[in-house]
Image (tube, helix red, strand yellow):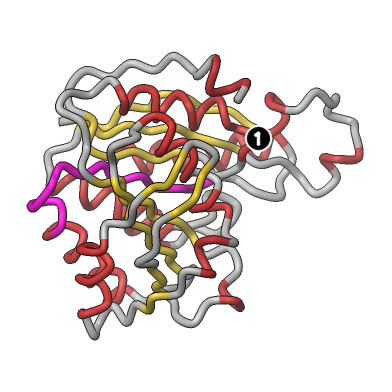
Amino acid sequence: MENVAAPSAYQAEGRLSSGIIPNHLLASDMIAGFFYLAASQQPGYDTVVILSPSHYPQQCTSGVVTAQNGWDTPFGTVEADEDFAALLLRDSLAGAVNDPAAPERDHGVAGLVPFVKYYLPEAEIAVCLLENGLDADRLAAVGKILDEFRDTKRVLVVGSADFSHYLQPEEAARCDAETEKAITNGDLDTISRYTDRNVDSPQVITLVLQGAETHGGQTVQLDHSSSVEKLPHSLGNAIYSEGVTTYFVYAFVQ
């Protein structure tokens, strides 16, 4: 709520069609800033689609998971857009399953849902968890479904992704520079080979970038930060013994 009260101040010229935001609540000011920007768009959105890495794939029944259920939040219920889930579930190549428990316990989705309700109270929500290592054909099938869905409603696509993991700050900064260049250039081949050194879900980034290209999105980097900047501890603190996590916020505007 502190970050909802003082969201990061982002600006982007044009219609916001999609974005990439953190999924660690440590970066809540960045998450709030993105959705605050989304709330300023007129007209608003019918549906927010959240694409997230599957952080706990061992608890999922497929490499592509969706949910047909609504969500309870402190601000009220977010209704599910069942049309998107139905499209996914009908596609045999995507191989998606309806598994509401999986996104509910995955912070890549669950952490963002209250922000959707707070800033976009009239919007419905659709979710999709993507397993790392998902093969290109299945990922392409999900992307095709997403493109078709975007033609039917006013949709905001949100890629939930954290970037460099488990590295010390200097090395993480080098990886972030590589990632920033790849995103700016739309270099999907490079992104497809990324590991946690660069981003926790190349699949999410790929779908967002492909969709932005199809729907005429200009890439705007709104923010860049890291856990070192968000936490009060000095760099020598043992909390950083396993490295840091970095965060970007991107907007794709028409």
22 left or right, relative to 140: right
Say what amino acid the circle numbered 1 marks.
Leu
Percent x, y for residue 87?
20, 70
Q: Does residue 167 appear to the left or right of 220 in the view shown?
A: right
Left or right of residue 186: residue 115: right
Residue 41, position as x, y percentages in the image? 23, 24
Q: Is residue 20 highlighted in magenta? A: no
The structure residue drawn at horizontal position 23% and vertical position 71%, both measured from the top left corner, is: 86
Q: From the image, tell me which residue sits under label 1.
A: 26
Estimate how packed mark 1 is, as few (under 14), some (14 to 19) or many (20 or more) residues with alpha carbons within 10 Å. some
Judged from this view, the residue extending furthest toward the left is 151
Q: In this view, does 67 lie above or below 97?
A: above
Span colored in magenta = 149-162
* Secondary structure beneath label 1: helix
Q: Which residue is drawn at 39% across and 75% down?
A: 98
Determine the residue positioned at 38% across, 51% down. 50
Q: Name the spot of residue 16 as percent of width and height, x first.
A: 23, 30
